[in-house]
Image (cartoon, helix red, strand yellow):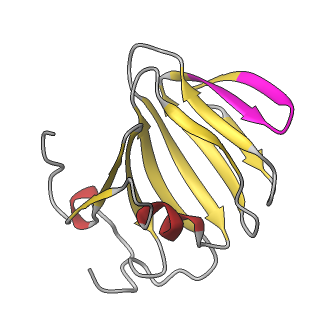
């Protein structure tokens, strides 16, 4: 995909598969040309989640689309679900765990972009080219 796209279909971007789920980064500098923020759709499988981590140089928001999970930010923990949003300041430890029987889906956005590239380059990540996500 070339930069400066304004309408992005999920099949136009690669899929990143990890042991806890998958991500489609729909807005990154390489997809849309955006330099201010990145955003993508994350799917956490039942019982899976992100280990506690930080993004030292980027703020993050998560907007939950479906499912239910446990969100930890610093020393605060809450149940989260569809229609809720959380804000994670730069450098603050956080984790997200799917506590339901169905996938937990959310939009993740970073400002400025950068953490999405770190996730993509993770040794545990499998990157599938644009197109329909293969049944794995």
Using residue 64 as the reference point, say whether residue 2 is left or right of it: left
Q: Residue 71 lies in magenta, yes or no?
A: yes
Q: In which image quadrant can residue 24 be found?
A: bottom left
State the residue at coordinates (40%, 85%): 4
Q: In which image quadrant can residue 131 be found?
A: bottom left
Q: Nearer the viewer, residue 92 or 10?
A: 92
Q: Nearer the viewer, residue 97 or 113?
A: 97
Say above or below: 47 vs 43.
Answer: above
Say above or below: 36 vs 80.
Answer: below
Q: Nearer the viewer, residue 21 or 2?
A: 21
State the residue at coordinates (56%, 51%): 108
Q: In which image quadrant can residue 74 be found?
A: top right
State the residue at coordinates (58%, 23%): 69
Quarter of the image that includes the C terminus:
top left
Using residue 57 as the reference point, say whether residue 24 is left or right of it: left
Say above or below: 29 vs 127.
Answer: below
Residue 50 image position (x, y, % from top left)? 56, 39
Span shown in magenta: 69-78
């Amino acid at each position: 995909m070339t930069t400066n796209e304004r309408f992005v279909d999920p099949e136009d971007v690669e899929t990143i598969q990890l042991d806890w789920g998958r991500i489609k980064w729909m807005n990154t500098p390489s997809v849309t040309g955006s330099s201010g923020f990145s955003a993508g759709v994350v799917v956490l499988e039942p019982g899976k989640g992100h280990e506690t981590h930080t993004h030292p140089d980027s703020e993050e928001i998560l907007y939950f689309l479906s499912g239910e999970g446990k969100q930890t930010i610093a020393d605060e923990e809450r149940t989260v679900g569809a229609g809720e949003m959380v804000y994670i300041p730069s450098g603050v430890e956080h984790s997200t765990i799917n506590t339901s029987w169905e996938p937990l889906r959310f939009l993740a956005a970073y400002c400025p972009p950068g953490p999405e590239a770190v996730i993509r380059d993770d040794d545990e990540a499998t990157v599938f080219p644009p197109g329909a996500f293969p049944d794995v």
